[in-house]
Amino acid sequence: MAKTILAVDDSGSLRQMVVFSLRAAGYQVTEAVDGQDGLDKAKAQVFDLVLTDQNMPRMDGFSLIRALRALSTYQKTPILVLTTESSDEMKAKGRAAGANGWLVKPFDPQRLTEVVKKVIG
Protein backbone atom coordinates (compact mmCIF):
# COMPACT_ATOMS: atom_id res chain seq x y z
CA MET A 1 0.00 0.00 0.00
CA ALA A 2 1.27 3.48 -0.87
CA LYS A 3 2.62 5.66 1.92
CA THR A 4 0.34 8.59 2.76
CA ILE A 5 1.44 12.22 2.96
CA LEU A 6 -0.43 15.28 4.17
CA ALA A 7 0.68 18.40 2.24
CA VAL A 8 -0.28 21.62 4.06
CA ASP A 9 0.21 24.95 2.27
CA ASP A 10 -1.98 27.99 1.63
CA SER A 11 -0.57 28.36 -1.90
CA GLY A 12 -2.64 26.30 -4.32
CA SER A 13 0.04 26.35 -7.02
CA LEU A 14 2.70 25.13 -4.60
CA ARG A 15 0.42 22.36 -3.33
CA GLN A 16 -0.14 21.30 -6.95
CA MET A 17 3.62 21.03 -7.54
CA VAL A 18 4.12 19.06 -4.31
CA VAL A 19 1.21 16.73 -5.07
CA PHE A 20 2.32 16.17 -8.67
CA SER A 21 5.91 15.40 -7.60
CA LEU A 22 4.98 13.04 -4.78
CA ARG A 23 2.20 11.21 -6.64
CA ALA A 24 4.60 10.64 -9.54
CA ALA A 25 6.92 8.99 -7.00
CA GLY A 26 4.11 6.66 -5.89
CA TYR A 27 2.86 8.37 -2.75
CA GLN A 28 -0.77 9.00 -1.84
CA VAL A 29 -1.14 12.73 -1.07
CA THR A 30 -3.90 14.63 0.72
CA GLU A 31 -3.96 18.44 0.52
CA ALA A 32 -4.80 20.94 3.26
CA VAL A 33 -5.19 24.70 2.68
CA ASP A 34 -3.84 25.87 6.07
CA GLY A 35 -2.76 24.60 9.47
CA GLN A 36 -6.29 24.24 10.85
CA ASP A 37 -7.42 22.29 7.78
CA GLY A 38 -4.29 20.15 8.11
CA LEU A 39 -4.98 19.42 11.78
CA ASP A 40 -8.59 18.49 11.01
CA LYS A 41 -7.48 16.11 8.24
CA ALA A 42 -4.72 14.62 10.42
CA LYS A 43 -7.29 13.84 13.12
CA ALA A 44 -9.54 12.12 10.56
CA GLN A 45 -6.79 9.98 8.97
CA VAL A 46 -3.32 8.94 10.10
CA PHE A 47 -0.57 9.92 7.64
CA ASP A 48 2.95 8.50 7.28
CA LEU A 49 4.43 11.99 6.79
CA VAL A 50 3.32 15.60 7.15
CA LEU A 51 4.79 18.30 4.92
CA THR A 52 3.87 21.82 6.03
CA ASP A 53 4.46 25.45 5.15
CA GLN A 54 5.22 27.84 8.04
CA ASN A 55 3.42 31.09 7.10
CA MET A 56 -0.31 30.36 6.69
CA PRO A 57 -3.62 31.90 7.79
CA ARG A 58 -5.71 30.48 10.67
CA MET A 59 -2.84 28.32 12.00
CA ASP A 60 0.85 28.55 11.10
CA GLY A 61 3.12 25.58 10.55
CA PHE A 62 4.77 25.58 13.98
CA SER A 63 1.37 25.69 15.71
CA LEU A 64 0.27 22.79 13.52
CA ILE A 65 3.41 20.81 14.38
CA ARG A 66 2.91 21.38 18.13
CA ALA A 67 -0.77 20.36 17.85
CA LEU A 68 0.18 17.20 15.93
CA ARG A 69 2.91 16.28 18.42
CA ALA A 70 0.31 16.54 21.21
CA LEU A 71 -1.67 13.73 19.53
CA SER A 72 -0.51 10.20 20.39
CA THR A 73 -0.80 9.13 16.71
CA TYR A 74 1.67 11.83 15.58
CA GLN A 75 4.34 11.76 18.27
CA LYS A 76 6.77 9.83 16.05
CA THR A 77 5.45 10.76 12.58
CA PRO A 78 8.04 12.57 10.44
CA ILE A 79 7.13 16.22 9.87
CA LEU A 80 8.99 18.32 7.28
CA VAL A 81 8.73 22.09 6.92
CA LEU A 82 8.67 23.43 3.34
CA THR A 83 8.95 27.22 3.50
CA THR A 84 10.65 30.34 2.17
CA GLU A 85 12.11 30.88 5.65
CA SER A 86 15.71 29.70 5.87
CA SER A 87 17.27 31.44 8.88
CA ASP A 88 18.93 29.37 11.60
CA GLU A 89 16.57 30.98 14.12
CA MET A 90 13.50 29.76 12.20
CA LYS A 91 15.00 26.28 11.82
CA ALA A 92 15.65 26.18 15.58
CA LYS A 93 12.02 27.18 16.24
CA GLY A 94 10.91 24.44 13.86
CA ARG A 95 13.00 21.82 15.66
CA ALA A 96 11.69 23.05 19.01
CA ALA A 97 8.12 22.65 17.72
CA GLY A 98 8.92 19.07 16.67
CA ALA A 99 9.87 19.28 12.98
CA ASN A 100 12.23 16.58 11.68
CA GLY A 101 13.52 18.43 8.62
CA TRP A 102 13.50 21.62 6.58
CA LEU A 103 13.21 22.29 2.84
CA VAL A 104 13.41 25.78 1.35
CA LYS A 105 11.10 27.09 -1.41
CA PRO A 106 11.35 27.18 -4.28
CA PHE A 107 12.03 23.47 -4.07
CA ASP A 108 13.52 21.02 -6.53
CA PRO A 109 10.92 18.26 -7.09
CA GLN A 110 13.63 15.59 -7.33
CA ARG A 111 15.18 16.76 -4.05
CA LEU A 112 11.74 16.72 -2.39
CA THR A 113 11.09 13.13 -3.43
CA GLU A 114 14.61 12.10 -2.36
CA VAL A 115 14.10 13.58 1.11
CA VAL A 116 10.64 12.03 1.47
CA LYS A 117 11.97 8.64 0.34
CA LYS A 118 14.82 8.88 2.85
CA VAL A 119 12.38 9.72 5.66
CA ILE A 120 9.52 7.25 4.97
CA GLY A 121 10.79 4.92 2.25
Image (cartoon, helix red, strand yellow):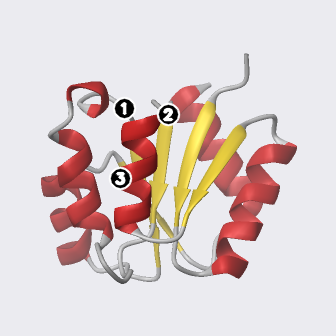
Residue at (36% x, 39% y) in the render: 43
- Within-10-Å neighbours for mark 1: few <14, some 14–19, many 20+: many
Label whose residue precedes the other's in the sequence (3 or 2): 3
Asked if 19 appears above or below 25 in the picture, the reply is: below
The kind of residue on which mark 3 rests is Leu
Residue at (66% x, 68% y) in the render: 15
- Within-10-Å neighbours for mark 3: few <14, some 14–19, many 20+: some
The mark lying in front, picked from 3 and 1, is 3
Asked if 98 appears above or below 33 in the picture, the reply is: above
| Residue 98 visible in rendering | no
Residue at (28% x, 59% y) in the render: 64
Instruction: Tell which residue pokes out farthest to the right in this image.
Output: 24
The kind of residue on which mark 2 rests is Phe
Residue at (17% x, 64% y) in the render: 92
The picture places residue 23, in percent across and down from the top left corner, at 80, 45
Which residue carries the number 1 mark?
A: 77
Choose between 35 and 14: the one closer to the eye: 35
Query: Label 2, label 1: how many angstroms apart (C-alpha)?
Result: 8 Å
Query: Label 3, label 2: how many angstroms apart (C-alpha)?
Result: 11 Å
Q: Quadrant of residue 114?
A: top right
The kind of residue on which mark 1 rests is Thr
Which residue carries the number 3 mark?
A: 39
